[in-house]
Image (cartoon, rainbow, N blue to C red):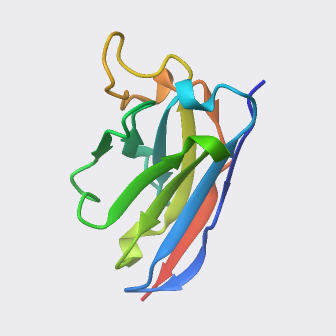
Amino acid sequence: QVQVVESGGGLVQTGGSLRLSCTTSGRSFSSYAMAWFRQAPGKEREWIAAISKTNNYTYYADSVRARFTISRDNAKNTVFLEIINLKPEDTAVYYCAADPRGGLFGSHIPHRAEDEYDYWGQGTQVTVSS
């Protein structure tokens, strides 16, 4: 079973920044498409960013595109999410997820649907104070 562990969340003030990290176990990280989701209080979990297994193609939800950056280090089995100019509406639990099939068949494009991701972390809480 692949273990996924997020870290880097915390309490920050509006306008601050954070770098979330997500590390997976095993030797197959470079074959995974990776994604970040978040769930705000009282809301459904939403997809916010993804990165392809190769060539580092990145994809973002429109609501976060200007402030969020996803990246990966395959040598360290780690994917990152850098967030700048944090806003109170960014308060949520942030989840990292891995798709072992590597995204849409025959392409580098990661999925956006939750059920395409087999491995999930427990989440890391981000709280933005106003």
- Residue 114 lies, in percent from the top left, at 46, 30
Residue at (30%, 67%) from the top-left corner?
67
Residue at (41%, 53%) from the top-left corner?
70
Would you say 42 lies left or right of 26 here? left
- Residue 88 lies, in percent from the top left, at 40, 77
Nearer-the-camera pick, 74 or 90 = 74
Would you say 40 lies left or right of 6 here? left
Question: Outermost residue toward the right?
Answer: 1
- Residue 2 lies, in percent from the top left, at 74, 29
Residue 62 drawn above or below residue 35:
below
Nearer-the-camera pick, 81 or 86 = 81
Residue at (66%, 47%) from the top-left corner?
76
The quadrant where residue 74 appears:
top right
Q: Quadrant of the C terminus?
A: bottom left
- Residue 14 lies, in percent from the top left, at 40, 86
Would you say 63 lies left or right of 121 here? left
Q: Quadrant of the N terminus?
A: top right
Residue at (49%, 37%) from the top-left corner?
34
Q: How many marks?
A: 0
Nearer-the-camera pick, 126 or 71 = 71
Question: Outermost residue toward the top?
Answer: 106
Residue 13 drawn above or below residue 61:
below
Nearer-the-camera pick, 64 or 103 = 103
Question: Outermost residue toward the front?
Answer: 75
